[in-house]
Image: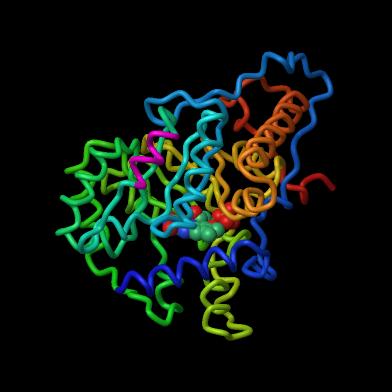
Amino acid sequence: MSDEYLSVRKKEHLEICSTDQAAFKYKTNGFEHYDFIHCADTEVEIEKIDLETFFFSKKISYPFLISCMTGGTDKANNINLELAHAAKQLNIPLGLGSIRYAIEEGGKYDNLIEIRNIADNVPLLGNIGAAQVINKENHKKLEKIIENVQLDAMVIHLNPLQEILQKEGEPYFNGLNKSIEKFVRKTEIPVIVKEVGSGISKQTAERLLNTGIKGIDVAGSGGTSWAAVEIIRNKKNHSEFWDWGLPTSYCIREIASLRRKHNFLLIGSGGINSAFDAAKSLALGSNISASARIVLQKLNEAGTEGVIALVNEWFEEVKKIMFLTGVANLKEFNKKKLILKKDLH
Ligand SMILES: Cc1cc2nc3c(=O)[nH]c(=O)nc-3n(C[C@H](O)[C@H](O)[C@H](O)COP(=O)(O)O)c2cc1C
């Protein structure tokens, strides 16, 4: 694929996602069906609530990750540099957008080293599409980038819906799980698999975990619809696929139950657009919540400082929620602190 073509596509993605036009129309993340169980006799000392957690071996200040977005063009690099400043100040992980451009013919990645230098010691996540992992010739190139940029984890994104709707899409995933397994065996850093807004079912999660991956980011439905992004790019108004996918809350609940058999990091994302969404994702069983489009929009509107303020404000709210549900730490937070609203009446 030509550089010029790729950069036009990325520009369009950024433009569309800077507005709300690619949101799901009718499907939600499902969190509105849940309420927190109020604890009238809370004895929690709010200033002692501990939100620190681990992203694999690194300690982070909030259970929050800036989801993988963009890269590979000047504008995209600037966005990543600004996000790196925010991640560094907040001491939270930063996901990079697809680094496909860096493994293609003559690919350069000085920009990734620059981002790493700014992000300093916070976890930095590489990102690559499933199709690129199926091509085993790419594994060595990815290894080199992992080493040179000192990436902390590699995220493989699954986006069959986007590929099937994209004019120039490549919906070919034969051999996917075997290829992931091979990649996992070779690489020394943890591998995470994510969707991009259609969610991951329990059955898919189980197959993926059997390949040896160490993390799953559900990236469920209810936030950004990548079908919508491509439908808008195709200059069509509507398609039944606009709202395709499994809601974020459903994916978290289902996949969290696999902890009985597997040890893995569960990231709850897809339409996490408020402190309450982030808190409900954690209370349903994720280790970390994550957001993409709302972070991009905040960056456009108020810069790095705006992103820092947003995340700080959200987690001040999360602390209040923990106080009101009677829990002082994240471990306790996902133990029966939510109730389905239908059970309240
Ligand atoms: C502008 C933009 C670019 C994105 N690019 C990527 C990407 O390169 N790789 C990826 O795995 N996900 C990508 N995503 C998907 C997000 O990581 C996320 O899974 C999805 O947008 C759902 O989260 P949200 O509802 O908080 O936006 C992108 C999202 C946005 C908004």
Would residue 61 be found to the left or right of residue 38 on screen? left
Residue sitting nearer the eye, 245 or 115: 115
Would residue 159 be found to the left or right of residue 45 on screen? left
Q: Residue at x 39, y 30 (%)?
A: 56
Q: Residue at x 42, y 36 (%)?
A: 260
Query: Considering the image in quadrants, where does the N terminus appear?
Result: bottom left
Number of numbered markers: 0
Do we see residue 52 in this rendering?
yes
Asked if residue 33 is positioned above or below residue 123 in the image, the reply reads below
Q: What is the x, y in percent for residue 310?
A: 68, 39
Do we see residue 201 in this rendering?
no
Residue 287 forms part of the magenta stretch: no
Q: How is the image coloured?
A: rainbow
The magenta region covers 111-118
Q: What is the x, y in percent for residue 340?
A: 72, 47
Asked if residue 91 is positioned above or below residue 171 in the image, the reply reads above
Q: What is the x, y in percent for residue 62?
A: 57, 29
Q: Residue at x 66, y 70 (%)?
A: 21
Q: Residue at x 58, y 60 (%)?
A: 221
Would residue 303 be found to the left or right of residue 216 on screen? right
Q: Main SS of the magenta segment? A: helix
Residue sitting nearer the eye, 273 or 18: 18
Residue 116 forms part of the magenta stretch: yes
Q: What is the x, y in percent for residue 170?
A: 33, 75
Asked if residue 293 is positioned above or below residue 244 in the image, the reply reads above
Q: Residue furthest bottom?
A: 236
- Specify the quadrant of the image occupied by residue 238: bottom right
